[in-house]
Image: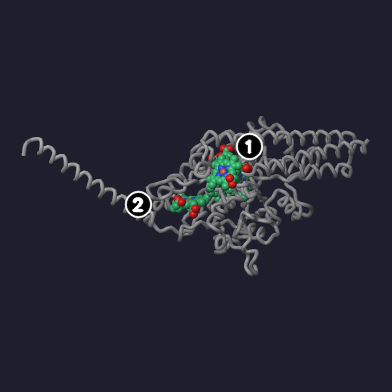
Amino acid sequence: MNRKTLLGYGAVVVVVSGLSALVTGLLMNIYERKSEAKNPYVHLVEVSEDDTDPAKWGVNWPKQYESYQLTALATRTRFGGHGGSEALPEQKIERDPWLKRIFLGYAFSIDYRDRRGHAYMLSDQEETKRLSKPQTGSCLHCHASVMPLYRELGGGDAMAGFKASYQLSYQEMNARLHASGHAHPVSCVDCHSAETMKLRVTRPGFVKAIQALAASEAPLPHLPSIERWRATNRQAPYDPNALASRTEMRSFVCGQCHVEYYCSSAMPLEFPWSKGLRAEDLEAHWNGVVLPKGGRFFDFKHSESGAEILKVQHPEFELWSQGIHARSGVACADCHMPYQRDGATKVSDHWVRSPLLNVNRACQTCHHSEEQEILARVEVIQTRNFNLLQRAGQALVDQLDAIQAARAAGAGDEQLQPTRELQRQAQWRLDFVAAENSMGFHAPQEAARLLGEAVDLARQGQVAALKAKEAGR
Ligand code: HEC
Ligand code: HEC
Ligand code: HEC
Ligand code: HEC
Ligand code: HEC
């Protein structure tokens, strides 16, 4: 063999062995991916219903745990990540000057904390100065991994424990939470079965409310398992964990907390869903509730007008229910917990946050437009909604001015009653959109409808106040 052939031979050997190594590597890789996909996690530790510490679950499911921990990072978009509905940030008062006026008489201007990621839900609640006025143990329903404590309070029966918890003060319930070792924010066990890892709902407030909703007449085309249950003999109440589809569960787990509610030491925590999920259905529910001390339900009396006002809290589940995405089977988790690839397995991003920080995976899986174009569409929706919100706020302020003038002219309770009723209705609709956290995105047309009605009702109320003023003279 001359040198040339020898070199050539050597090159072939190198190429062949390189190729076979490549093929073997590829086969091994495919094999590994397949078995990964079949058995995505090895159980290194056993977890149970009483394991509220996410770190323990993280041993088995490190990817999900890692992304879950990222909820401790600060995020912000034009409207997202701040401006929580339960208090009045200086910044928000500057942005929406009517806010302070319409909530006169409601004690929440005491303290504001930026709404943040899930990692902070318990500590932010513990630190809020709003707790300087007495609050109920019910507050913990949505701010901690509270199920073992409910079972403890109810002698094994979580629903019984839940029903008892409103009578405990926040401080007492919180102390017990810490003593029992379950002082964690929303944790794996709140959304996943410890045995099967399947999604499930745990919160008694949600379970009671979805059962009442199922038993109502309200059309629910976006919740087909409820429509199916309605067609049965209804012997047992609707059971979301047994009957809901996976798609429905991907929203139900969030609906345990991101909803309108009332909680106080006067009655158990309640979600107002017995007549449906639209703003007027919720309003009709509250109008039907009689306070334990007697009289029609309200959250506070407006200190200028004396009207009995309802305060709205974060109705994300309810507003989403009225939108095209819900109608098309797009769940909260599709946008807020989109899949990431990890080898052959898909991992749901447990860094729950604004989807605008993650358009590529949150939206572009379904919408094949450029990222900038998608962001621009959201911007248009949110800006229109914001502008309409300002006009509705102004209309309500004008009504309040007219009521002030009527009172100054000597109008009494009887003459003011019609305008006070209109204030209650207008403010409910305005606040429904203001307290919801997507700035109209979750259901743009529904939000616009509500704001249009709010403007109309406030202007009618202004006219009614003018009449009261005439009568008062
Ligand atoms: C089609 C996608 C989509 C679906 C489905 C969806 N959302 Fe959203 N959500 C958004 C967008 C977009 C925003 C606006 C984010 C922003 O302004 O930064 C938002 C905002 C929010 C915010 C405020 C976020 C922040 O950073 O302040 C919360 C909370 C929220 N959604 C909860 C929910 C819940 C609960 C559901 C289901 C009941 C849901 N969303 C369904 C897209 C979606
Ligand atoms: C146990 C109650 C609970 C559950 C369940 C829950 N959340 Fe939240 N969520 C909260 C609370 C409380 C906050 C505010 C925390 C704070 O400001 O300290 C929050 C904050 C958020 C934010 C704002 C994050 C930020 O960085 O500003 C988004 C978005 C959100 N949740 C979406 C969801 C989605 C989507 C689901 C379902 C997959 C869900 N949440 C399930 C209680 C809950
Ligand atoms: C039905 C579930 C639920 C209950 C009950 C509940 N919260 Fe929240 N809370 C939430 C959600 C969801 C958020 C995040 C969305 C937002 O801020 O609008 C939040 C946000 C907060 C925040 C952070 C933002 C802010 O407004 O400062 C504080 C503090 C808070 N809640 C305190 C309380 C207190 C005190 C109670 C009892 C009176 C309570 N919560 C009861 C669901 C609930
Ligand atoms: C607020 C509810 C919620 C919490 C809290 C939560 N998850 Fe999830 N998780 C989901 C949703 C929604 C999915 C998607 C499930 C589906 O589509 O079937 C999911 C999926 C998963 C999966 C299946 C694979 C995947 O990524 O889709 C694993 C494993 C998992 N989560 C582990 C965890 C662990 C570990 C924790 C705690 C560190 C946790 N989860 C906390 C809602 C939650
Ligand atoms: C799982 C699929 C899916 C995901 C994820 C999704 N969408 Fe959609 N989106 C739809 C469907 C379906 C429609 C209804 C219109 C249609 O049938 O073409 C729609 C409609 C819309 C519309 C028109 C709304 C209206 O009221 O007419 C906008 C804007 C939109 N999506 C933006 C977004 C944004 C922004 C995200 C990410 C935060 C997102 N979508 C995520 C499926 C999705």
Contact check, label 1 and label 2, Cβ < 8 Å: no
Asked which secondary structure carries label 2, the reply is helix
In the picture, measured across the screen, residue 98 lies left or right of residue 126, that is: right
Q: x%, y% of residue 135?
A: 64, 48
- For the question of whether residue 167 can be seen, the reply is no
Q: Is mark 1 within 8 Å of ligand 5?
A: yes
Which image quarter holds the C terminus? top right
In this view of the protein, which residue sits in the foreground, 303 or 338?
338
Residue at figure coordinates x 48%, y 42% from the top left = 361
Residue 442 location, quadrant: top right
Residue at figure coordinates x 53%, y 41% from the top left = 355
Neighbourhood count class around disc 1 (C-alpha, 10 Å): few under 14, some 14–19, many 20 upward: some
Q: Is mark 2 within 8 Å of ligand 4?
A: no
Label 1 is placed on what type of residue?
A: Ile
Q: x%, y% of residue 227?
A: 63, 60
Query: Which is nearer the N-term, disc 1 or disc 2?
Result: 2
Image height of 240 relative to 405, above or below:
below
Asked which secondary structure carries label 1, the reply is helix
State which image quarter holds ligand 3: top right
Residue at figure coordinates x 46%, y 57% from the top left = 197
In this view of the protein, which residue sits in the foreground, 376 or 149?
376
Its colouring scheme is one colour
- For the question of whether residue 367 can be seen, the reply is yes
Q: x%, y% of residue 295?
A: 79, 53
User: What residue would you read off at disc 1?
Assistant: 381
Q: x%, y% of residue 359?
A: 51, 39
User: What residue would you read off at disc 2?
Assistant: 33
Which image quarter holds the N terminus? top left
Residue at figure coordinates x 75%, y 54% from the top left = 291
Image height of 435 relative to 217, above or below:
above
